[in-house]
Amino acid sequence: IFGDNGLGYVNETRIINKDITSNISATLNFDLNDDLNLTVLTGFDAFDSRYDRVTTNGGELDIFDLYSLNNAAIITTSSFEQQYRLLGLYGDISLGYKNAIYLSLTGRNDWSSALPVANRSFFYPSVSLGVVLSELTDLPSLLDYTKLRVSYAGIGKDTDPYRTNTVYGNASGFPIDGTTGWTRGNQRGAPDLVPERTNTFEIGAEVRSQNNRLGLDISYYNATSVD
């Protein structure tokens, strides 16, 4: 900006960054009978972020070792502001039978300020099932513990703020004779941007023997992301 900076320069940057996270949740447990247990969890998340930066550069210092903007002949200023908010509502229902069969259903809905109004609400569920065979039936004495599991989970993800519009920034070298200049960014906005979704599937088995001193855990896992 100031050539080889032979006449010196000074830079001052002020940053105000505020992130607020809040969460409220409730959990209820029910013994439906001697063998069946139900757990219900529900909650709400809120994340709010605000970032404000102002940078002032001063060049051509009059007094070489006085690092003050008042000592600069050329003053340029740039600023950047960003606001972002993500709200989430979630729930989890879990059933347990005789400490041997476990079924869990979850769901979450998020609302993101970084997405277009029509697409800023997105829901993603999950379901998992685990069966401890060694608690349900007699297995060979060699096996101390045997469990089978299978699960599906959907994951939703938004984006960084201000990617839905083509934005403008200050043009280099301005102002000129009191005229402010703007330049269009080199990244085109996506007004129809939708949330990214990842679908995961897993199936596995766990076996232990020799008084739990020897174990084997096998899993097959697949994840596919779209949008």
Image (tube, helix red, strand yellow):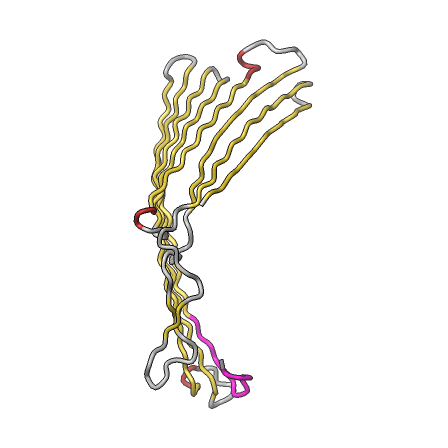
What residue sits 44% from the left and 36% below the top? Answer: 154
Q: Is residue 92 magenta?
A: no
What residue sits 36% from the left and 77% below the top? Answer: 181
Residue span colored magenta: 2-13
Image coords of residue 120 (percent x, y): 34, 47
Q: In which quadrant will I find the C terminus? A: top left
> How many callouts does the rendering have?
0
Q: Which one is in front, 225 or 98?
A: 225
Q: Quadrant of residue 139?
A: top right
Q: Is residue 113 above or below residue 219?
A: below
What residue sits 30% from the left and 49% below the top? Answer: 117
Image coords of residue 20 (percent x, y): 37, 52
Q: Which one is in front, 78 or 27?
A: 78
On screen, residue 146 versus residue 112, left or right, reads right
Q: Is residue 190 above or below residue 110?
A: below
What residue sits 53% from the left and 12% below the top? Answer: 136
Image coords of residue 7 (percent x, y): 52, 88
Image coords of residue 220 (percent x, y): 59, 30
On screen, residue 48 versus residue 155, left or right, reads left
Which residue appears farthest toward the top when viewing the image? 138
